[in-house]
Image: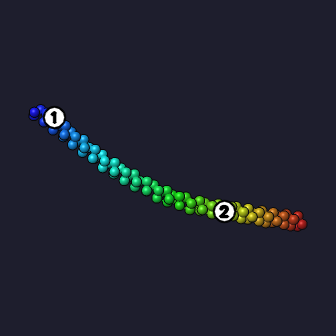
Amino acid sequence: MSGAYNSIRESYERSLSSQRRVDGTTDTVRSSQQVRHDVEELLRRRQDQFDHGLGANNVSLANVSVRIDRFRVEIRDLNDLVWLRKSLFHHTHTHTHTHV
């Protein structure tokens, strides 16, 4: 009988050991689910922050683009004035020297 008792006892101990491993796995699964939830929440918040920052950057870039276009026009106008003045100066001095 002791052989059967030992066999049953060994089976029972293996069963308890297996149950402990399963219980540990269950805790790991619960912990993993919580970590996954936390990571997904963090990603969602970061995505919101990223989208907000991207929107603000796009507005800033549009403003910079408008200012650059305005400066291009102003530089072109200034360039035209410089060339006109230079041309008038040259024309005036050229005619002045020919009459001397």
Q: Quadrant of residue 68?
A: bottom right
Residue 11 x %, y %: 19, 37
Compared across the picture, whether 19 is left or right of 6 comes to right
Q: Nearer the viewer, residue 56 or 92?
A: 56
Residue type marked 1:
Ser
Residue beneath disc 1:
7
Q: Is residue 16 above or below residue 100?
A: above
Q: Residues within 10 Å of mark 1 (few under 14, many from 20)?
A: few
SS at badge 2: helix
Q: Is residue 33 above or below residue 53?
A: above
Quarter in which the C terminus is drawn: bottom right
Cα–Cα span, label 1 and label 2: 86 Å
Q: Nearer the viewer, residue 5 or 78?
A: 5
Q: Residue at x 65, y 64 (%)?
A: 67
Q: How many marks?
A: 2
Residue type marked 2:
Val
SS at badge 1: helix
Q: Is residue 43 above or below residue 3?
A: below
Residue 71 x %, y %: 68, 63
Residue beneath disc 2:
66
Compared across the picture, whether 10 is left or right of 38 comes to left
